[in-house]
Amino acid sequence: MKVFALTVDPYTHAPIVILKDLEDNNALPVWIGSPEASAIASKIDSVEYSRPMTHDLMKEIISGVSATVEKIEINDIRDNVFYASIHIEGITGAFKLDARPSDAIALALRTDSAIFVDSKVLDKSKSIDLRTKEAVLGEETPEDLLNMLEEFEPDEFGKYKM
């Protein structure tokens, strides 16, 4: 998957990162916290800070111990909470860390790592199947959702559509 957009829920005003598969068949909205949205947005906008922010520090630590982030995976959804893992390859072998999806995505963007979503998450979530043009989010079609996103004011949507 890839980060398609960073937006705001029009009802709760919570940030949402929208992931889209590489074939443009499925989209997955993941509600995240404001600090993580800021971390994702700063990477999308190529903002450089004078001191490392948390996800930049994580990247430097991983690199500093001669390890690499192989991929991140959003691997479960339970009670409307998404779960993710960060897959790391180091000198002692491969291992997996539990993470919030927002942190995993922010790190993946910084390390140019692949973003995967388990098919069961797509099945259980409020994902959009763009092949059938039907949304699980109610009666809206994907076009309706995209039109809704297009109607956001610039300060609501920001400049974070990729």
Image (cartoon, rainbow, N blue to C red):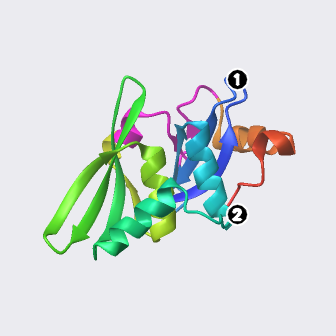
76 sits to left or right of 25: left
Q: Is residue 143 above or below residue 39?
A: above
- The label nearer to you, 2 versus 1, is 2
Who's the residue at 85% across and 45% down the image? 154
Q: On the image, which quarter does residue 140 sit in?
A: top right
Q: Are marks 2 and 1 in contact (CB under 8 Å)?
A: no
Q: Which residue is mark 1?
A: 11
Please state which of residues 131 and 41 is positioned toward the viewer in this rendering: 41
Q: Is residue 100 magenta?
A: no
133 left or right, relative to 89 = right
Farthest front residue in view: 51
Magenta residues span: 121-139
Instruction: First in sequence, mark 2 or 1: give its number.
Output: 1
Residue drawn at x 34%, y 63% is 71
**Amino acid type indicated by mark 1:** Tyr
Cα separation, mark 2 vs mark 1, equals 26 Å
Residue 95: quadrant of the picture: bottom left
Q: Quadrant of the C terminus?
A: bottom right
Residue 15 at x, y = what percent? 63, 37
Is the residue 144 above or below the residue 24 in the image?
above
Does residue 148 appear to the left or right of 92 in the view shown?
A: right
Q: Which residue is mark 2?
A: 45
**What amino acid type is highlighted by mark number 2?**
Asp
Name the element at disc 2: loop
